[in-house]
Image (tube, rainbow, N blue to C red):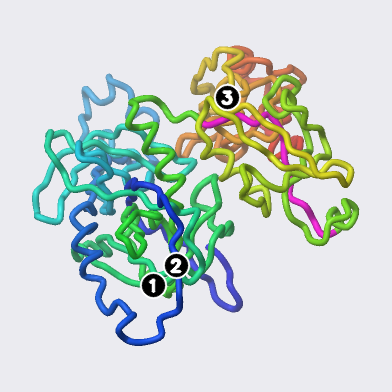
Amino acid sequence: MVRAGSFVAALILAVAVSAPAQAQTQTQTRVVPESKAQVQLSFAPIVKRVAPAVVNVYAQRTLRQQGGSPMFDDPLFRRFFGDGPLGMPKDRVESSLGSGVIIDRSGLVVTNHHVIKDATEVKIALSDKREFEADVVLKDDRTDLAVLRIKEKGDYPFAEFGDSDQIEVGDLVLAIGNPFGVGQTVTQGIVSALARTQVGVSDYRFFIQTDAAINPGNSGGALVDMEGRLVGVPTAIYSRSGGSIGIGFAIPGAMVKFVAEQAKTGGSLRRPWFGATLQNVTPDMAEALGIKRPVGTLVAGMSAKGPAANAGLKVGDLLVAIDGFEIDDLDGFGYRYSTRPIGGTAKISIIRQGKPMTVEVGLVAAPETVPRDERMIRAISPFQGAVVANLSPAVAEELRVPNALEGVVVKSVETGALAGRFVQKGDVILEVNGTKIDSTKTLEKVTQSDPGSWRVAVQRGGEVVRFAVRS
């Protein structure tokens, strides 16, 4: 929930999908229309071109009833009492509806991760009423994107990507999706703002804002320009009522295309590793750095053998641009850097002690320096129900852990688990009852016996948090 003025504005996921397109190859001169003849009075040609590529996405997931006794999982108990009212609670099937965009002829579909999260079955419905089963090829909660593939081979209509880096505030756009499940719907608006960061639906907070009506069910659908090319995927709205009030947000097409291209190769999603901790610039910092306004992002820490250090960056350097794109803040840098393909280099403009410089950073994947050894802690302890892993640069990059320390990190916490009261995703467990936690095996061993009380130290968001718990 987001409080705005005297009312509470809810940030609502708008279940939707996006599709790839080809980048604009030449810049066109734009002019303000001087007569009605110069104004395009109908969007029908655009809709006819792209609408067949926008699909409905139906997802089913099985939810375990919460609150039952652990004895319900015991096979002997279930043998005598079965799965009825006195036995183990029955699973509940939940359905969700969103939108998606076909991005190539073979039937590759882009949608939002939250549309298909935990789905056991996914179906795609085309605008011509045909329905197909689909497989999840790639899903990424950090970007709130997922890529599906229609199981039945065919030659499908698809959308092309536009260049989301070239759109401007004031440009006309169309949003196409299936709001509230009423059927494919087209709405029109403008680009209201770019690089919006106050939208907490993914780790990469860098969104296109539009006043085109976006409602629940639009998530994963298409935001297209006036040439019918995909420039964004609607994902969330601000709303007091649950419906559109003209403030919607879309994931930029550049991020969608980056994820989709990796899905086409059949590999997992690999992002470039930077190997440094960054922070935003405050007005006081800007004054001390001798810059007119707080822009860019400051290097606050460095991994000794990471790409940033290898490129010659130092703590205190101010990063102001990457490959020609100006950097306003930490979120802007994260978006620009994360959409660069591994294997090349990124030119980063910096200011060091008042002097402008440029460095080239090699784009490489974060290494797995130690085995992850993921495991769930099941013993009764402050960590019961937490999935933990050994920390490496690769794991730290995935979870956006500020400092790549040695130790054990919480990857997730099971819903309703005891661990949810004490730890959260991204916590680095440093110490338990005086024992340094250097591996998942060490943590599991420490939790095997009940000491009566627990003294725990974790790193959370760059700070060390200590707490004590009685058994």
Give the secondary structure at mark 1: strand
Give the image location of residue 331, x and y in percent: 62, 49
The mark nearer the N terminus, 2 or 1, is 1
Evaluate if marks 2 and 3 touch, with contact meaning CB atoms under 8 Å apart: no
**Residue 126 visible in rendering:** yes
The mark nearer the N terminus, 3 or 1, is 1
Q: CA distance from mark 3 to mark 1?
A: 39 Å
Foreground pick, 433 / 221: 221
**Residue 251 visible in rendering:** no
**Residue type highlighted by circle 2:** Thr
> In the rendered view, would you say 152 is above or below 436?
below
Residue linked to disc 1: 189
**Residue type highlighted by circle 3:** Val
The mark nearer the N terminus, 2 or 3, is 2
Give the image location of residue 318, x and y in percent: 78, 44
Q: CA distance from mark 2 to mark 1?
A: 7 Å
Residue linked to disc 2: 210
User: Is 343 displayed left or right of 109 in the figure?
Assistant: right
Q: Residue at x 26, y 71 (%)?
A: 43
In this rendering, which labeled residue sits more in front, label 2 or label 3?
A: 3
Q: Is residue 282 inside the magenta stretch?
A: yes
Residue linked to disc 3: 364
Give the secondary structure at mark 2: strand
**Residue type highlighted by circle 1:** Gly
Residue stretch rendered in magenta on the structure: 271-283
Evaluate if marks 2 and 1 touch, with contact meaning CB atoms under 8 Å apart: yes
Q: Residue at x 29, y 34 (%)?
A: 136
Residue 348 position by quadrant: top right
Q: Residue at x 63, y 47 (%)?
A: 324
Q: CA distance from mark 2 to mark 3?
A: 34 Å
Q: Residue at x 74, y 26 (%)?
A: 309
Foreground pick, 395 / 435: 395
